[in-house]
Amino acid sequence: MKLLILGALVSLPAIANLHLAPPDFDTNRGRAIFVDFKTATYDITYDLKKRQTRVLSQITFEAMAEGRPLFDLVPLPRNAVLNGRPVAIREIAAPDGALIRQVDASVPPGIHTLELSNTFTENVKYGLFGRGVSSAFWIRDLKYRKFLEQYVPSNLEFDQYAVTMNVTFAGVSEAKQDIYTNGAVTRTSSNRYQIKFPSFYTASGHYFHTTPKGRKKRLDFTYRSVDGRDIPVTVYTSWWSRPGKFKQEALKIFAELEADYGPWAHDSFVAYETLPGTGGMEHAGATQTSLGALDHEMLHSYFAKGIFPANGNAGWIDEAIASWRDYGYQRKPLPGFGGSNLGLGSSYQRNTDSRAYALGREFMAYLDYRLQDVGGLKAFLRGYFQTYKHTLITQEHFKNNLEFFSGLNLTDDFNTYIWGENVGLPSRIDPSPHHRTLSRSNLLKLL
């Protein structure tokens, strides 16, 4: 009940998250403002003859103040039209130096529409002689600009909005493609599909992978959740592995996580098994992962993609929780370091600090020690997840709820171990084996 009461005090309605955006800032061409995306429609065309991927996007957004709207898109935007009039799109630097896109026209407060086009080559591989395409909207959270903006125009992590993808395979009369996604798929013609994604997803939530038909081994089944739902599950693998083994592991992990944290937070689960040792990456109710990292990535469908970090500075929380579980939910009277600045990045930061695994799990083990008289950290996390499922959180929100649940004052702990100075850190902090840094060529091999 404590968590529910605090939720009423500090939580604003889901999907109205402009209050979580970084501060607006001035540029030499006027005020740059963050905006609230309402809907985004992406018409994506895979041209199998020209071997080119094109996107036409339409975004409806709301500005709460006058200024030049911000969004992001890594590929070059073209043919931009704002409210029916051509407009230029500039790439500018935020106050911390990170790059971002700005509409080069000022808008008043209110609802506006932006249309633009782009092409992309990231994680796309065309077959010879127009024989299909492999493409995936995979993400990486340890590097900035590696979320949805790699492929299509998107907002930053603070925003949640409804996305529709219309996917066309041009150059063939009938598309012979398999589609794996955490959205709802409808085949609208012989070579066109529509995918609708839940409106609580952020730029790191969407999963989309298409391959030539029959390229992967696929197994579909259902999992009976503790709340009585039948959860549709799809696991698929490449030629060298058997999806049945993946299924058995997934069922075991489902049972563990639901016992610890409650019902699965999503309407389905999709998992693609990649090569051993490659680690994985979580999406909302979906993952691209090696078998050894499956448990880590499935936990992220609770913390990371069940409740979402609002920015890069909050990204350490879910990696710390997952790593704490990886190491057996240890309890420690003190962290294994004297202090750190793990959560002190720029307010414009969009990637997770790679030290989150090692330092974060030590801090979680310490929090578990401090909360032992009220059931421990897992008891808190279960209530925290069930209260804030499908919403965004910040570091401050996490701390405030910990304090309300426990009755403790954790200000000194956060000021020392998360928002402090680096003291007594290990000389070597190994990255997580579950989130390997893969090169562009490595990712293409996974397609």
Image (cartoon, rainbow, N blue to C red):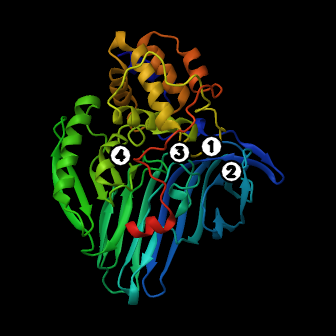
Mark 3 residue type: Asp
Q: Is residue 409 above or below residue 144?
A: above
| Residue name at image x 33 percent, y 86 percent | 173
Q: Which residue lies furthest to the right in this view?
A: 28
Tag 1–tag 2 contact (CB < 8 Å): yes
Q: Determine the secondary structure under disc 4.
A: helix
Q: Using the image, tell me which numbered label, if any, was put on residue 375.
A: none
Looking at the image, do the residues carrying marks 2 and 4 touch, with CB atoms under 8 Å apart? no
Return the disc, 3 or 1, that comes first in the chain's sequence.
Answer: 3
The image position of residue 85, as x and y in percent, is: 68, 67
- For marks 2 and 3, the one nearer the N-term is 2
Q: What element carries label 1?
A: loop
Residue under label 3, please give it: 159
Gap between marks 1 and 4 measured at Cα: 23 Å
Residue picked out by circle 4: 297
Of 270 and 372, which appears nearest the observer? 372
Residue extending furthest front?
427
> Dot 2 corresponds to which residue?
98
Circle 4 Cα neighbour tier, 10 Å, few/some/many (<14 / 14–19 / ≥20): many
**Where the C terminus falls, by quadrant?**
bottom left
Q: Which residue sits at x=23%, y=57%?
A: 234
Give the spatial CA distance, label 2 vs label 4. 28 Å
User: What percent of the width, then of the height, locates residue 377?
Assistant: 37, 21
The residues tagged by marks 3 and 4 sit, at their Cα atoms, a distance apart of 22 Å
Q: What element carries label 3?
A: loop
- What residue appears at the point 48 percent right and 46 percent down from the top-left corner? 160
Mark 3 nearby-residue class (10 Å; few <14, some 14–19, many ≥20): many
Q: Residue 174, position in %: x, y? A: 30, 83
Q: Name the residue under label 1.
A: 349
